Image (spheres, rainbow, N blue to C red):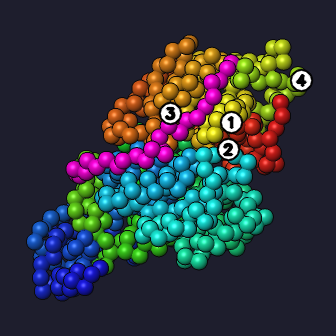
């Protein structure tokens, strides 16, 4: 704060002058003592200056209602919402989220530093506070075909930005374990700048927690059960409990939380589609779900506010207390977490689920982020998957609502040495086509668990290198779906019997729409209607599930542009 602002805050705190705004007769959620206290909350210059009995130039009587801190999403890829940060803010603010810790890892894998800078520019000056962790693993593994490669020398200048606070999810565990120069340079750079380091330990054994902690890595959001959570807390980590669109880990992890260790837990969404955010919510949904599983409401709020703020060293966020930023929620109900009003820095941001901002900004998209799908003209012959014998072959089996997959070996449908998808066996063809350098590489495999009856789906969102990925019941529809992505320069497509049933263009790096969020929601509605037409179940998100089949750091089997990849052996498999 400037000297004048200090004076104004002290004058209001001592009651020599009226505060800018006072919330009268509040039931205040005290996240420090885990109790409810009664009183007025005075705000000046966007910060809380006192709790007690105050007068304000504006007074809001909230008798019978609760006042709690604004929520913090501890780890989110904004790109997964398919809208830029300034549109994303309009969706999450009504759900009480006033701060996010964003990892622009997805757009960085396509467009490098220019992609990161775009996310910083798009989030400048908006009501939502967007802090950024710099992507640590671009590409995620050394053999992937991403659109960019970022080393410490590329990332370091970005630490000059005031909202860049650390190094994002370190997912290349092999690079950490073997102490590779590239990874060590990034870790050393981050600690030299006294910044934070996030982890990513999907399916890794407890011994590797020791390695990660020894490397200065402090968090993990890939925990899928209570035992894993306790192992990480025992070794001094913070655990981010994730509830997103595909990874819904909270029900299996929340039982690890108790009154003795709850301060080491916080919430995140990681990857959540726009329609899920709009309908279900963000961190507010995590709170509601945690309470349903027996967590005390105040503890759940503490996890979503103070715990997250302390984990990421946001010293003026996460509490209703003097000196803290006036990011505040007015709740009609504590147990049901019913949000009536959202205030950002003392200004009304949302009322009854409707955002209150006239922010109509448009951020010019750099040309380098457009026209990023570079794909040669595929032929049907490029999609053929040869099966060399009649033995069981490797099959990727999806697990609905999880990022991990199962490795199966099964007999499949083969004719003249060529695989043919079988809806009876639930064996679909899975392909990944390199789209950054026009190499012509097309990885092919077999996936089980989608229960797709006809047609094909394809997307340019395939974590983390974001090549084109598609699954289908026949090669012709697969080809058409991929061509639709090329025409639209990225997005989603649903195809059946030679017809495009629905498509959603994502022109910014093949990940983000340049349209208002309302238009994107309308497009997603059409996509879901088309998915229903081709027989996909509604018990999981098929596109998000598909997109994570390209992430070769999460067990057990995944696909790359070179074919099926065994994460545990870190090798490609041969059919």
Q: How many marks?
A: 4
Pick whichever, 18 or 369, lies toward us: 369
User: Which mark's residue is nearer the viewer, 4 or 2?
Assistant: 2
User: Disc 2, disc 3: CB below 8 Å?
Assistant: no
Q: In the rendered structure, which disc, 1 or 2, sits on the residue that comes first in sequence?
A: 2
Q: In the rendered structure, which disc, 4 or 1, sits on the residue that comes first in sequence?
A: 4
How many C-alpha atoms fall within 10 Å of the one at disc 1: few (<14), some, or many (≥20)? some
User: Which mark's residue is nearer the viewer, 1 or 2?
Assistant: 1
Q: CA gap, disc 3 to disc 4?
A: 38 Å
How many C-alpha atoms fall within 10 Å of the one at disc 2: few (<14), some, or many (≥20)? many
Q: In the rendered structure, which disc, 2 or 3, sits on the residue that comes first in sequence?
A: 2
Inspect the magenta stretch and tell me whether residue 128 lies in it: no
- Report whether residue 285 is seen: no
Q: CA gap, disc 1 to disc 2?
A: 9 Å
- Residue marked by disc 1: 439
- Residue marked by disc 3: 489
Secondary structure at numbered mark 1: loop
* Res. 389 mark: 4
- Report whether residue 446 is seen: yes
- Residue marked by disc 2: 145
User: Which mark's residue is nearer the viewer, 1 or 3?
Assistant: 1
Secondary structure at numbered mark 3: loop
User: Disc 3, disc 4: CB below 8 Å?
Assistant: no
User: Disc 1, disc 2: CB below 8 Å?
Assistant: yes
> Would residue 431 be found to the left or right of residue 565 on screen?
left
x 69%, y 69%: residue: 184
User: Which mark's residue is nearer the viewer, 4 or 1?
Assistant: 1
Pick whichever, 189 or 260, lies toward us: 189
């Amino acid at each position: 704060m400037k000297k004048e602002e200090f004076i104004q805050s002290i004058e209001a705190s001592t009651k020599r002058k009226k505060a800018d705004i006072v919330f009268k007769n509040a039931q205040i959620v005290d996240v420090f003592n885990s109790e409810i206290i009664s009183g007025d909350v005075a705000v000046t210059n966007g910060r809380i200056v006192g709790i007690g009995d105050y007068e304000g130039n504006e007074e809001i009587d909230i008798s019978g209602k609760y006042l709690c801190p604004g929520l913090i999403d501890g780890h989110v890829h904004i790109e997964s919402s398919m809208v830029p940060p300034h549109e994303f803010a309009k969706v999450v603010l009504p759900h009480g989220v006033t701060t996010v810790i964003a990892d622009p890892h997805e757009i960085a894998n396509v467009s490098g530093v220019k992609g990161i800078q775009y996310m910083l520019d798009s989030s400048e000056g908006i009501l939502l506070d967007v802090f950024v962790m710099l992507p640590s693993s671009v590409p995620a593994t050394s053999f992937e075909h991403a659109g960019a490669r970022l080393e410490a020398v590329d990332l370091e200048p970005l630490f000059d930005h005031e909202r860049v606070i650390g190094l994002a999810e370190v997912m290349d565990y092999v690079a950490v374990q073997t102490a590779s120069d590239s990874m060590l340079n990034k870790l050393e750079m981050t600690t030299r700048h006294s910044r934070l380091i996030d982890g990513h330990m999907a399916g890794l054994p407890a011994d590797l927690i020791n390695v990660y902690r020894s490397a200065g890595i402090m968090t993990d959001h890939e925990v899928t059960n209570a035992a894993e959570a306790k192992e990480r807390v025992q070794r001094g980590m913070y655990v981010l409990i994730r509830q997103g669109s595909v990874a819904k880990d909270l029900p299996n992890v929340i039982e690890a939380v108790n009154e003795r260790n709850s301060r080491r837990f916080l919430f995140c969404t990681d990857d959540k589609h726009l329609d899920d955010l709009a309908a279900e919510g963000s961190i507010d949904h995590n709170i509601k779900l945690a309470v349903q599983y027996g967590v005390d409401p105040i503890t759940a709020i503490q996890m979503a506010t103070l715990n997250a703020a302390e984990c990421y060293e946001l010293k003026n966020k996460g509490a209703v207390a003097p000196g803290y930023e006036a990011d505040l929620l007015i709740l009609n109900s504590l147990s049901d977490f019913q949000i009536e009003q959202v205030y950002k820095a003392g200004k009304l941001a949302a009322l009854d689920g409707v955002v209150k901002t006239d922010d109509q900004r448009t951020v010019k998209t750099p040309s380098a982020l457009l026209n990023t799908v570079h794909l040669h003209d595929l032929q049907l012959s490029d999609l053929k998957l040869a099966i060399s014998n009649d033995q069981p072959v490797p099959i990727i089996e999806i697990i609905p609502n999880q990022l991990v997959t199962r490795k199966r070996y099964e007999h499949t449908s083969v004719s003249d040495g060529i695989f043919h998808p079988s809806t009876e066996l639930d064996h679909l063809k899975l392909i990944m086509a390199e789209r950054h350098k026009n190499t012509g590489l097309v990885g092919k495999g077999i996936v089980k668990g989608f229960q797709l009856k006809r047609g094909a789906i394809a997307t340019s969102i395939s974590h983390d290198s974001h090549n084109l990925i598609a699954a289908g019941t026949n090669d012709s529809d697969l080809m058409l779906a991929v061509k639709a992505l090329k025409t639209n320069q990225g997005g989603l497509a649903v195809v059946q019997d030679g017809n495009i049933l629905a498509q959603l263009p994502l022109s910014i790096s093949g990940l983000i729409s340049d349209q208002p969020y309302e238009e994107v929601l309308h497009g997603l509605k059409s996509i879901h209607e088309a998915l229903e037409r081709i027989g996909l179940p509604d018990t999981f998100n098929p596109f998000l599930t598909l997109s994570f089949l390209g992430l070769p750091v999460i067990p057990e089997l995944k696909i790359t542009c070179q074919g099926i990849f065994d994460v545990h052996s870190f090798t490609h498999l041969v059919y």
